[in-house]
C-alpha cells in the first residue's frame, strides 16, 4: 500500500509515526508532505527509522502542481495549522482550509487515489447544546455562519462538502474523521491548548492558570489511541462516512487541572483567572459508539492513564 500524508510532521503525523515504529506498518511507501523536512529530521529522525518514508517539500496550497510520479492507495489530509491558527487572519484560516483541501483532492485524483481520509474537527458541529450530553455524527448543527469567528468550523464543514463532492464526481472512497481534543507527548505545550498549558506549568513547578472559571467540560484522547484509530481507517474499509474520534470521558477544566497537579506531585496551586459567562454550559464531548465498534477489543486509555503516559514521556523522552 502506498500512503500520502499531509500534516505528516505535525501532531497527527508524529502520533502515527510513533505508532508505526511500535507496530507493523506494512506500507510499501509512505510519502510525507512538509514545508521543512530538514527541520523535522534534525529533531525527529528517530520517528522515521526503519519506515519506508520519503518527503516531498512543499505546501498544500500548490500541491496539485506537483509532478511527483506515484499512485497512492490512500491519501490522508491532516494538514491544518491549528497551532498557529489564532494568529492567522480569519479569512486566511478559511482559505487555508478550503483551498488547501481542494488542492489535496486534486492531487489525490491525479495520483489515482482509491481512498481519501479528511481530518476534520468536532468544531463543525458548532456550540454543543446544553441539553446534549455528547455530540453524535448525525447532529447537523453548525457554527454561526454570520459570525466571523466561525472561520475554522465553517471552513472544516466546507472541506467536508468538497471531499464528498469530489468523491461523488471521481468515484473514490472517503472517510471524514471529526477529531476532538487530544493529549500526548507531541502536543505543543506553548500554544492555545488548555491541557498542554496546564502540563507545561506543572512541569515547570508553576501554578496552573485557568483562563476562565474552570467550568467548561472537555474530554481528551491519548495520541496513541488516536493513531490506532487512524491506522484502522487507513488499512480497512468501513461502511461509514463520518466518524467522531476522541474520548467521551469528560471533566471540567478545573477537574482536569487537579488531576495533572496530583500526578505531577508538585506543590503548586490552581488559579482561576476569570468568571463564568452567564449560565452558558460550555461543553465539547463526542459520542463515540461508531469509533468503539470498529476498534474491536482495543482498550482506550482513560484520562488518568493518558496524563500519566504523557508526563512520563515528557520527563523521560
Image (cartoon, rainbow, N blue to C red):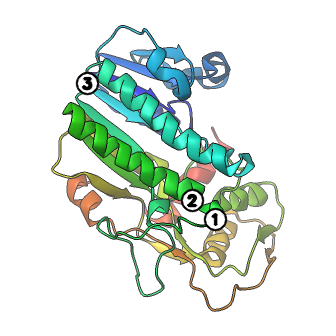
Few, some or many residues within 10 Å of mark 2 (<14, 14–19, 20+) = many
Q: Which mark is residue 307?
A: 2
Going by the picture, which residue comes out furthest to the right? 206
Q: Quadrant of the N terminus?
A: top left
Task: Give percent across and percent down for residue 197.
Answer: 72, 58
Q: Nearer the viewer, residue 144 or 277?
A: 144
Dot 3 or dot 1: first in sequence order is: 3
Does dot 1 land on a helix, a strand or a loop? Answer: helix
**Residue wearing tag 3:** 73
Circle 2 — which element?
Answer: helix
Q: Quadrant of the C terminus?
A: top right
| Real-space Cα separation, disc 3 to disc 2, in angstroms | 35 Å
Horizontally, residue 108 falls left or right of residue 90, namely left
Q: Which residue is drawn at the image coordinates 65% and 57% (left, top)?
A: 193
Q: CB atoms at circles 1 and 2 under 8 Å apart? A: yes
Which circle, 3 or 1, is nearer the viewer?
3
Q: Position of residue 43 (x, y in %)?
A: 66, 24
Q: Position of residue 41 (x, y in %)?
A: 61, 19
Q: Which residue is more in the foreground, 169 or 87?
A: 169
From the image, tell me which residue sits under label 1. 263
Q: Using the numbered discs, state the Cα–Cα distance from disc 1 to disc 2 in whole angstroms.
A: 8 Å
Q: x, y (%) of residue 209?
A: 79, 69
- Vertical placement of residue 269 versus 205, above or below: below
Q: Helix or strand or loop: what does disc 3 sit on?
A: loop
Mark 3 and mark 2 residues within 8 Å of each other at the beta carbon = no
Mark 1 / mark 2, whichever is N-terminal:
1
**Callout 3–callout 1 Cβ contact below 8 Å:** no
Cα separation between marks 3 and 1: 43 Å
**Looking at the image, which residue is at 33% across and 69% down?**
136
Amino acid at each position: 500500500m502506498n500512503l500520502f500524508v499531509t500534516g505528516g510532521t505535525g501532531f497527527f503525523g508524529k502520533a502515527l509515526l510513533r505508532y508505526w515504529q511500535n507496530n507493523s506498518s506494512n506500507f510499501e511507501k509512505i510519502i510525507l508532505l512538509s514545508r521543512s523536512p530538514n527541520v523535522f529530521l534534525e529533531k525527529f529522525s528517530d520517528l522515521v527509522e526503519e519506515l519506508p518514508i520519503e518527503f516531498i517539500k512543499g505546501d498544500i496550497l500548490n500541491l496539485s502542481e506537483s509532478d511527483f510520479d506515484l499512485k497512492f492507495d490512500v491519501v490522508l489530509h491532516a494538514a491544518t495549522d491549528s497551532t498557529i491558527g489564532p494568529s492567522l487572519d480569519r479569512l486566511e484560516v478559511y482559505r487555508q482550509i478550503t483551498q488547501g483541501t481542494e488542492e489535496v483532492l486534486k492531487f489525490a485524483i491525479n495520483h489515482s487515489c482509491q481512498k481519501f481520509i479528511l481530518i476534520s474537527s468536532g468544531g463543525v458541529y458548532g456550540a454543543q447544546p446544553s441539553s446534549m450530553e455528547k455530540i453524535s455524527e448525525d447532529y447537523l448543527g453548525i457554527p454561526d455562519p454570520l459570525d466571523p469567528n466561525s472561520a475554522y468550523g465553517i471552513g472544516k464543514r466546507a472541506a467536508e462538502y468538497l471531499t464528498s463532492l469530489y468523491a461523488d464526481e471521481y468515484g473514490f472512497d472517503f472517510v471524514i474523521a471529526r477529531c476532538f481534543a487530544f493529549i500526548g507527548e507531541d502536543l505543543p505545550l506553548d500554544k492555545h491548548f488548555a491541557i498542554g498549558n496546564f502540563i507545561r506549568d506543572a512541569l515547570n513547578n508553576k501554578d496552573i492558570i485557568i483562563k476562565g472559571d474552570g467550568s467548561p467540560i472537555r474530554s481528551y484522547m491519548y495520541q496513541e489511541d488516536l493513531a490506532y484509530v487512524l491506522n484502522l481507517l487507513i488499512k480497512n474499509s468501513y461502511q461509514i462516512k463520518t466518524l467522531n474520534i476522541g474520548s467521551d470521558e469528560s471533566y471540567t477544566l478545573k477537574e482536569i487541572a487537579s488531576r495533572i497537579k496530583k500526578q505531577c506531585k508538585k506543590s503548586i496551586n490552581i488559579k482561576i483567572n476569570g468568571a463564568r459567562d452567564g449560565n452558558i454550559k460550555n461543553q465539547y464531548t463526542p459520542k463515540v459508539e461508531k469509533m468503539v465498534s470498529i476498534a474491536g477489543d482495543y482498550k482506550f486509555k482513560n484520562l488518568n492513564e493518558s496524563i500519566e503516559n504523557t508526563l512520563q514521556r515528557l520527563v523521560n523522552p
